[in-house]
Amino acid sequence: MKLPPFAYACPTTLPEAVQLLSSNDDAKPIAGGQSLVPMLAFRLAQPTLLVDLRKLADLRGIRISGKGVTLGAMVRWRDIEDDDRLDTAHPLLKAAIAHVAHYQVRNRGTVGGSLAHADPAAEMPGTAVTCDAEIAVVGKSGARVIQAADFFQGALTTALTADEIIVEVRLPAWPKGRRWGFEEFARRRGDFAMAAAAVFYDQSKDGKAHNAHVGVIGVADRPLRLPSVEGVLNGRVIDQAAIAEAEAATCAAVDPQDDIHASAAYRRALVGTMVERALKRAAARLQQ
Amino acid sequence: MSVRFRVNGREVEVDVEPRLTLADCLRHHLRLTGTHVGCEHGVCGACTVLVDGAAVRSCLMLAVQAEGAEVVTVEGLSSDAELTPLQKSFRKHHALQCGFCTPGMITTAHALLSEEPNCDAARVREVLSGNLCRCTGYIPIVEAVLEARAAYQPQARASDRSGNRA
Amino acid sequence: MRTVNSLIGSPIERLEDLRFLRGRGQYVDDLARQDMLHAAILRSAVAHGRIRAIDTAAARALPGVHSVITAKDIGNRVPRVPMRLQPLPDFEPFGQPVIAETKVRYVGEALAVVLADTPAVAEDALGLIEIDIEPLPPVADRLASAKDASLLFEEAGTNRAITFRAVRGDAAAAFAGAPYVRRERLRTQRHMALPLEPRGLLAEWDGARKRLIIYGGAKVLFFNRRTLAKQLGVPESAIDIVENDVGGGFGARGEFYPEDFLIPFAARLAGRPVKWTEDRREHLMCMNHAREAECDVEIACTRAGTILGLRGHAYVDVGAYMRTNGAVGARNVAQFMSGPYRIPHIDIDVALQLTNKTPVGTYRGPGRFETDFFRERLLDMVAQDLGLDRVEFRRRNLVSQREMPYQIATITPFESKDELDSGDYHATLDRCLDEIKWSEKSKLAGKLVDGRYHGLAVGCFIEGGAAGPKESARIVLEPDGLYSVYVGSSAIGQGLETVFAQIAADALEVTIDRLRGVFHGSTSYVDDGYGAYHSRSVVMGGSAILDAATKLREAIRLKAAQRLDCQPSDVEIVEGVKAVGPGGKAVALTELSSISAEGAFLNKKHTYTYGTHAAHVAVDPKLGHVELLDYVLVADCGRIINPLTVHGQAVGSLVQGLGGAMMEHLAYDQEGQLLTGSLADYLIPTASDFPNLRAIVLENHPSPINPLGAKGAGEGGIIAAGGVMANAVANALSELGVEPRELPLTPTRIWELVQAARSNKKSA
């Protein structure tokens, strides 16, 4: 499975990178290569030019402020794992990313790469959608910001144009006391999720939930927010009954397909279980 | 394209196509055949090498991406004179049979123990789950890595564990 | 100081580790030749079709491409891959041409060979070859195959290659009078050995001396050489097949594959060395598949729990061609369904059905894994029906020592009469139950704890080994006084160099450092070798080494006697260094050398390592996830040469078995397309999947049929895993009435069984 032939460029600035992508047909950016290189090995993609982003140092930072968490596109899973600030600044992100792939992949795989690749069962896209992230990109027409909800358009398909590069992803600030849970089930540790759920809500003084966010991966061609499930949770205490209702609403809200790893019926039930268990974690979480 | 980097402490320069993976470059251009290729799509871990200290899948890296990097392969983690403590532990625990996954296991374990000399069994299994083995059933490998932790403790000498001429 | 018998039985650290740990192993892809060409093989993307045209012009024009070989370059009749085992005339019509000639019959079948300067260019060229294939209706499974509506081989007129039958006693009578009968349909899935090193070959043709050297051999090099010589029209002596280090075999590597002709042929045609390395995508669709079997069987018992008979039908999906050892699994499904149990009346037939899938071959415990699953599931179902304790039911029916040798079912077409040779099957059962703390854990059986159902199961197995007919060895006392051991056995990772060194050193009465080495596998080492299969190496190769050692010592005594002017019987060899005659006169062996002797061991009987597996699982009914909380395997292998390596084999074999039980599956669609084309889809166990298991290997009952008392070991770990895991899951979910009848036990399958069982209960 040798790679098909391509030309290679390694720009030192973002404008240079954009210029290379714009002026070459079938050029593709390469970051960590953990998703792209296997595609090349199977000759599922045959770009004529790879534009290596590794020298773009500006894209490697993790910035935390009152506004939230900003991850540079070249931030690796390893960097997220090693950044202790994220334990409080964005525990859901940390928990989700802990499920990504394996040790060696985590040393190279990047946030931007995962978002651009848009695998329907990947944790970063799921987290971005669940958390209303904004994805900042740069292309020949300049910079723009794409809402996560609009970014993922299908399996391995995003709103990016061929000349655009992701610069960073911005996650809104994470308040103290937020209730959250992340639950995933994969065939083996590190495999793509058969289904996963990321949930959070904030709790009013009367113990009722509001601002509920429920996001799932593995059950459609892109990550899904489930407003009908959020509707079940908002305005009430998250007790056994609420959780059971949320599980049922989840199953009703999705329409997964059969594949060799799981049947549609199983995935539908599984994602309900993932939401249920994530909510149980959220409800049990100690007040911070 | 010309690429310059360091392998096992030695400066090398190779002239390669951009599409050549680091794994193939090491094996066929530099004749360091200790790094093995088992899948070419980033699953089996037999191709694991260290790049700037981090364990990576060399089949998923282009040789041209190694420009300026410090690469260490299993040969660089070995010495002719004596087996390293990690290697001795593998041998003692019969943590290898056909030997094909072994360089990847050794390299990954070395990276893990260098960063986390006090890792526990669960962590060792978690990290090694990115390296496939078809012969041993993994249990002896985990045992070998756990026993080798002693050699990676701060008080043990660095030269003891790396096998490099110290 | 006598050093006799200090090495056999010792957990000696392996000699081969010294190079493997340093990355200094030499696997075939590590080899290079200055002027070598790289081969890539174009493989059919269509499962069944008639080849209309192959246009290689564009491929040949690609810079860096040397040539492209298709069937027409090979001659009038493209050679067939032979049947190595069970070469019955019935299989003749279904032989595989080494390259597709008029039809393609499976996705992955070779259509053309490209030779180029680099592997990458060779692969680029594949994409430029134009193939015109007229598609034919694919035969997707054994049911479609049996209809014979779409035929893989029109002249044969059928898709059924053969039907084997296993018979013992009078099943018809037994069933006629049986007070209790249970009938079930059970299935095991297609999966494969998947060694970590893909296949590879490097072939060099010496035009001047008209000799061929081929690197990358394994398992059965002598047979392959014989085959290739005939196919190329050269004498056997013109070919050497060399065994390098081998990254696992498990039964699948080393058999004669189409590439074993194509690559040497290409080297001779091109007049340059040709190297070929399989990639993983090819490997999944080209290396022998295995294990796809179904049965419709009945078991008859007395109400008190004595098994009276087993009868029924089995069906094995053998893929598109009969090649090498493709009939072994099916044969074993029928013959070994009784396992270690006393089943007096047996009548099982097994049909080998051809389909448009990759051909099958042996994979560790061939047919035995499948048939053990069938039988052990039946036993637990019967125990439940009759209200019997599952352990006591097994105990009652296990063959006992005093019944041995115990003849099992005879298979027709007639092969050999097989007998269970020696052993105490009850002892390993008891030991296993004790180790897993069965009585204590039984309290959890079927109980729901923290949202998971706990289950237990136990199963007994036999593992056949030591296939004959022969193995050869040669030992040379070198001029420097060191001993070199040559043996026809093949190393595939099982530690042969060390184990044979132990046997040889003990037999020569020397320390292990007095051996230069153990040289294995390659055809230049002995005249007549057989190789590594059916767990035969220790018994066959080891016994051949013993014979060679005995003969060498005789030869040394003879030569020393001439020097010392005495009788050979008066000569004593001291520590393998000097020969001492009467009166203390001595001569150093270095002065007598070099002396060499050949040995052999002939064998017609199989040995049977045996034992018991037990498992404790926790099943999450919502996830369909099974956690293996504890697993114990106890096996008695007759004589342990190296406890470290035999234990390693048991654990490794078991984890492969768990992979087969829980996750491995070569899935095809209705068009004959292989859906699991990468390691992201074909799932094998990783380090986190099964951390809780133990193997205990015993040597209480040596085999009576070889001088070592050894039995083949290495396959027992895998054999019982499927049956035991399925029974453990059934036990866990017994309150729900879940009965797994098919492997693998994936989350989807378990969840669906739970749903089905729940809705059955509702409507009941």
Image (cartoon, rainbow, N blue to C red):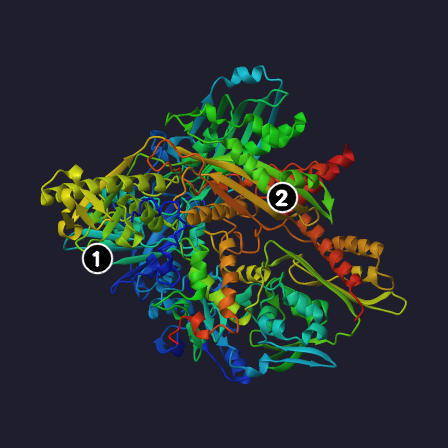
Across and down, in percent, residue C503 comes to: 32, 45
Give the SS element for disc 1: loop
Q: Amino acid at mark 1?
A: Gly
Q: Which disc is residue C616 wearing? A: 2
**Which residue is drawn at the image coordinates 49% and 23% (left, top)?**
C347
Q: State whether residue A5 appears in this view.
A: no
Locate the N terminus of chain B by quadrant.
bottom left
**Could you tell me how far apart the alpha carbons at marks 1 and 2 are, in whole angstroms?**
60 Å
Q: Is residue C402 above or below residue C509?
A: above
How many badges with numbers are in the image? 2
**In the image shown, does C299 or C239 lie closer to the viewer?**
C299
Chain letter of mark 1 equals C
Depicted B66 relative to depicted B74: above or below: below
Quadrant containing the C terminus of chain B in the rendered view = bottom left
Q: Position of residue C641 (x, y in %)?
A: 38, 44
Asked which quadrant contains residue C202, the reply is bottom left
Position in image of residue C483 (x %, y %): 23, 51
Q: Which mark is residue C656?
A: none
Residue C560 seen by the camera: yes
Q: Amino acid at mark 2?
A: His
Kindly identify the residue that appears in the image at 37 percent across and 75 percent down: B165
- Mark toward the start of the polypeptide (1 vs 2): 1
Residues behind callouts 1 and 2 on a single chain: yes
In front here: C283 or C572?
Answer: C572
Horizontal side of C111 relative to C309 (left or right) equals left
Q: Residues within 10 Å of mark 1 (few under 14, many from 20)?
A: some
Seen in the picture, residue C523 relative to C24 is either above or below; the reply is: above
Q: Which residue is mark 1?
A: C271
Q: Relative to the observer, which residue lies in front, C80 or C34? A: C34
Relative image position of residue C283 (x, y in whole percent): 42, 52
